[in-house]
Amino acid sequence: MITTKQRAYLKSLAMTMDPIYQIGKSMLTPEITEGISEALEARELIKINVLKSCTLDLHELADTLADRTHSDVVQVIGRKIVLYRESKDKKRIILPEGKKH
């Protein structure tokens, strides 16, 4: 679980990122979930674009994705979801220390 301070730091990093995945009417297939999990391992922080053809609630979708990929939802803004998961092998992002909330 990430802290408020860590979430703010990750949001600032995500502002300059482009989405690397799109979720549309096919919703959450196992292939998409696996691809997102692999991207999290490689990058730790990713942005996902949710197309208008996806009829799921964005917050529910973000929570489901986080649950399936063992990641944290950093934010849901507009039709974009930002996820974070610390890499097992290639740790790139050093999070600021902070109290757990």
Image (cartoon, rainbow, N blue to C red):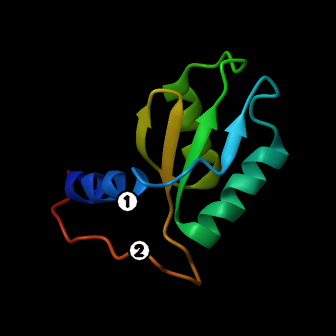
Q: Earlier in the sequence, mark 2 or mark 1?
A: 1
- Residue 56 versus residue 17: which sits nearer the camera? 17
Task: Kindly tell me whether residue 1 is visible in this rendering.
Answer: no
The amino acid pointed to by label 2 is Ile
Residue found 53% across the figure and 28% down from its top: 79
Q: Which quadrant would the N terminus be assigned to in this image? A: bottom left
For label 2, the residue is 93
Residue found 31% across the figure and 55% down from its top: 12
- Residue 37 versus residue 11: which sits nearer the camera? 11
Q: How many marks?
A: 2
Spot occupied by residue 49 in the image (x, y as percentages of width and height): 61, 37
* Disc 2 + disc 1, Cβ < 8 Å: yes
Query: What is the C-alpha distance between the residues marked 2 and 1?
Result: 10 Å
The amino acid pointed to by label 1 is Leu
Rendered image quadrant of residue 37: bottom right
Q: Residue furthest bottom?
A: 89
Q: Is residue 15 left or right of residue 5?
A: right
Q: Height in image: 56 above or below 44? A: above
Spot occupied by residue 65 in the image (x, y as percentages of width and height): 61, 42
For label 1, the residue is 13
Residue found 49% across the figure and 27% down from its top: 59
Spot occupied by residue 72 in the image (x, y as percentages of width and height): 46, 51
Which mark is nearer the camera, 2 or 1? Answer: 1
